[in-house]
Image (cartoon, rainbow, N blue to C red):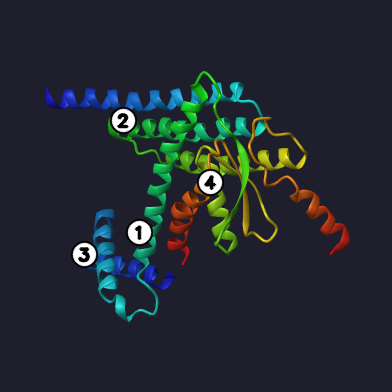
Amino acid sequence: MALQILLNLIIAFVWMFLYNDWSSSRFTVGYLLGMACIGLLNRFWPHDFYMKRVWAVIKLLSLFMRELVISSFAVMIQIVRPSLAIRPGIFALRTELKSDWEITILSCLICLTPGTLTLDVARDGRILYIHAMDIEDAEMLTNQIRGTFEKAIMEVTR
Amino acid sequence: MNTEMIKAIGETMIGLIVLVGSLIGALSAFGLIRLPDVYLRSHAATKSATLGVLLILTGAFLYFAFYLEHVSAKLLLGIVFVFITSPVAGHLNGRAAHRTGVPLWERSVQDDLAGIYGQEKEVRERDPS
């Protein structure tokens, strides 16, 4: 992956040299051209095309933004309601992610979305203890986190 | 006339973004006073504030970029740093509170973490490595 990015940068610089033009627009055109070349030769690389991973990162970010807005409004509605009709609690989430980075990113994303807060990670890193503002159904919350964040993170890292 | 109108509309939109952001900030401050225990308060303090800060800084960034012709990377860096630091702070506050035995609100429904620290301690005493 690093090799592909390096090659892409080299193509962009060669393009700039050929035009003898050092503007950022020329660099952008060269970079896009290099991206197209590398993408078309995708089959001959031992690894996947790196833009696939960039795309996965963008998908993860947009998913996170959506969750952030939705759950912020849910939390704010709970705060301004005249009677506190919430049932907070701590539930354990068994995660399938393995490396430290994946678990760190997952727990940060859980912390950032309102309504859920990672309290602790088990010593082996397989179980996250999450404080949720409103537990109707711990099973449902678990499935929700698994279906959205865990899947998106796996797409980025694997 | 047209450009004048577009400018006015754009300015109003940016004003609305900043206004919504500050309203969210005010609401989360209200939640900080109102909610009953440490864990719920940290929800209000660290979470709604992230969206509020995001909206205010985005509004400022758009205003600088379109009306003063100055792309301010510092504002974007501000967003990035808030998003890196606020979950860590929330997590550590909650963890420290639970470790020192701050009780949950009496209407909490479940606590899967309750017995874990005791077990950990026993394991460590039995096998100090």
The type of residue carrying mark 4 is Ile
Find residue B8 and report its image quarter. top left
Question: Mark 2, residues whose alpha carbon is within 10 Å: few (<14), some, or many (≥20)?
Answer: few
Whole-number angstrom distance, CA of label 3 to CA of label 2: 33 Å
Question: Mark 4, residues whose alpha carbon is within 10 Å: few (<14), some, or many (≥20)?
Answer: many
| Residue A125 rendering spot, x and y as whole percentages | 64, 59
Question: Which mark, residue A110?
Answer: 4
Screen quadrant of the N terminus of chain A:
bottom left
Q: Is residue A57 above or below residue B20?
A: below
On the same chain: label 3 and label 2?
Answer: no
At horizontal 79% and vertical 53% (from top left) the residue drawn is: B119
> Nearer the observer, disc 4 or disc 2?
4
In the rendered structure, which disc, 1 or 3, sits on the residue that comes first in sequence?
3
Q: Secondary structure at mark 4?
A: helix
Find residue B59 and report its image quarter. top left
Whole-number angstrom distance, CA of label 2 to CA of label 1: 32 Å
Question: Which mark, residue B68?
Answer: 2
> Nearer the observer, disc 3 or disc 2?
2
Q: Secondary structure at mark 1?
A: helix
> Can the viewer see residue A45 in this picture?
yes
Q: On the image, numbered disc 1 is attached to which residue? A: A55
In the visual, does B47 lie left or right of A13? right
Whole-number angstrom distance, CA of label 4 to CA of label 2: 37 Å
In the rendered structure, which disc, 4 or 1, sits on the residue that comes first in sequence?
1
Q: On the image, numbered disc 3 is attached to which residue? A: A19
On the same chain: label 4 and label 1?
Answer: yes
In the rendered structure, which disc, 3 or 4, sits on the residue that comes first in sequence?
3
The type of residue carrying mark 1 is Trp
Chain at numbered mark 1: A
